[in-house]
Each structure stands twice: as C-alpha cells, then as structure tokens.
Amino acid sequence: MQGKLIVFEGVEGSGKTTQMLLSRDWLLERMEKSASFSEMAITREPGGTELGKALRRLLLEGTLTHPIQDRTELLLYAADRSQHVEEVLKPTLAAGGIILCDRYTDSTIAYQGYGRGLSLSLIEKICQMATDGLESDLTLWLDVDVEIGLARAKARGSADRMEQADLAFHQRVQQGFRALAAAYPQRIVRVDASGTEVEVQGQIQAILTQRFREWSVEN
Ligand code: Z5A
C-alpha cells in the first residue's frame, strides 16, 4: 500500500492528541498482524521539525512583548508546514509509511480564515505553496461543542496564546471546520467527540478499518 497521511483536526480540547495516540497503538497492533504498511510516524503542526519547535514556541507561548500580527501568524504557520512537508511528510510517504498528524491545512483555514478573518483564497494559495500540493488522504474532524472542549483544555492546565482568545473566536473556528467537512465529504470525516475516550476511539477505528479496506483494494 502507498503511504497515507491521516490528520486529526478539531477545536481545543476536542481530544485530537488523545485519539491520535490511541489510534497509533491500535494501528501498531494491526501492523504486527498484516504487512499492509511499512512504518508509522506520529507528528504535529506546528512543531513537527526542529525549526517547527522553535516556531511553535514563538506562536503559542505568548512571551513576545509585541503582538503577532494576523498575516504574520499565517506566514509562521505556513513556514512550519513547508519545513514539515519536506523534512518529514514527503519522505515518510515515499517510504510507504502511515503518518498520523495532529493538525494540518484545515486548521489554517479554520483559525486564520474563519477565526481571524483573513481571506480564504489568500490562505488557499499560501497553503498550496507550503504543502507543494500535498493533501491529507483522510482527515478525522473531532466535533465537540466549543465550551466542552475549552473546559477540558482548561482542566488540563494553563492556557496558551490561542486558547486565551474569546469564545466567539473559537465558535468561528468551529464553524470553519463544519464548512470544510461539508465541502470535502470524502477527505474529511466527522467524528462525534462528545462521548468518552473509548466511545470516540470506537468510531475512529470503524472509519480507519473502512478506509484501509478501500486503500488496499486501490493498490
Ligand atoms: N493553529 C493555527 O492557528 N493554525 C494552524 O495552521 C495550525 C495550528 C496548524 C496549537 O494546536 C494551536 O495552533 C491551536 C491551533 C493553532 N490553538 N490552540 N489553542 P495544538 O493542537 O497543539 O493545541 P490544541 O488544539 O490546543 O490541542 P489541545 O488543547 O491539546 O487539545 P486536543 O489535542 O484536541 O485534546 P487532548 O490533549 O487529547 O485532550 C485535552 C484534555 O481533554 C486532556 O486532559 C484529555 O485527557 C481530555 N480528554 C480527551 N478526550 C476526552 C473525552 N472524550 N472526554 C473527556 N475528556 C477528554
């Protein structure tokens, strides 16, 4: 089977990271039983490379004295992505690996487009440049009420620069994910992320089982 890029998306506290790690464990078990893919990589944006880690600190820690301008923020996420695509994503896919990635281009459309209000067509062009056209094979959108997600994130500890944005911002971001899922029903699959971790993982395993079946027939 050819390499595949599987992305986890959603608002803060939707459970992306938790579900990505549970999915990794489940897929690794599967990998032992079948040789359908060669390796698995776990990664994230921002922060999937050495440069990306430095950009992540600048973007999220809120330690700069002057605020990051919206277009600057967009370009910093794009710089992180461009490096990530070349250094991690393309080589892993070329080797036939499966990549589980915490956030990718849909986050830019949802946060910088719907959230900050930057032009969607400008974002599309910048994403195209940063990814060199590399799209996800499957995006799992973990859909949970913004209030529930923020409460989960808050219970976990101190909020980063983006989490501190107001509720209306996060609601616009959620609207962005909803619009994207409606526009790309084959690539983006909605997961009801309001249940327990086990319930959410059950839905994800069913989606992944179906997709792996389709992918193995294609090859
Ligand atoms: N960003 C952007 O603006 N533009 C871009 O292009 C990109 C990113 C790529 C960093 O993302 C920030 O970057 C993000 C968007 C912006 N803004 N913010 N804020 P991140 O993914 O690193 O950070 P995050 O979105 O804040 O993730 P998170 O808060 O870590 O949430 P999560 O990964 O979705 O959830 P989690 O860590 O798995 O779970 C959060 C807590 O909830 C934790 O205590 C869990 O134990 C708990 N949890 C998880 N699942 C459940 C269920 N089912 N029930 C109850 N509790 C649960």
Image: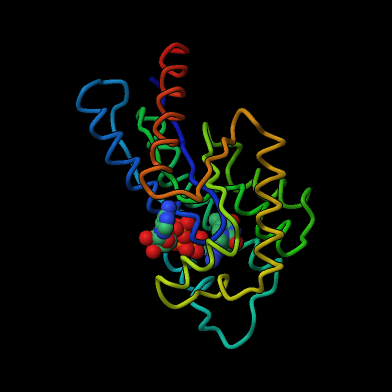
Quarter that holds the C terminus: top left
As rendered, which of 10 and 83 lies closer to the eye?
A: 10
Q: Position of residue 169 (x, y in %)?
A: 69, 67
Measuring 39% from the left and 47% from the top, which residue is drawn there? 19
Q: Where is residue 97, by image quadrant? A: top left
Q: Position of residue 180 (x, y in %)?
A: 68, 42
Please identify the residue farthest to the bottom as the structure is shown: 65
As rendered, which of 218 and 132 lies closer to the eye?
A: 218
- Coloured how? rainbow
Q: Position of residue 60 (x, y in %)?
A: 51, 72
Measuring 57% from the left and 48% from the top, which residue is drawn there? 143
Residue 84 shows in the view: yes
Q: Where is residue 48, by image quadrant? A: bottom left
Q: Is residue 111 above or below residue 5?
A: below
As rendered, which of 158 and 131 lies closer to the eye?
A: 158
Residue 78 shows in the view: no
Please identify the residue farthest to the left as the structure is shown: 32
Measuring 59% from the left and 56% from the top, which residue is drawn there? 145
Indicate left or right for 131 with 24 as reference. Answer: right
Q: How many marks?
A: 0
Indicate left or right for 91 with 143 as reference. Answer: left
Indicate left or right for 128 with 98 as reference. Answer: right
As rendered, which of 114 and 78 lies closer to the eye?
A: 114
Q: Where is residue 217, by image quadrant? A: top left
Q: Position of residue 102 (x, y in %)?
A: 46, 50
Quarter that holds the N terminus: top left
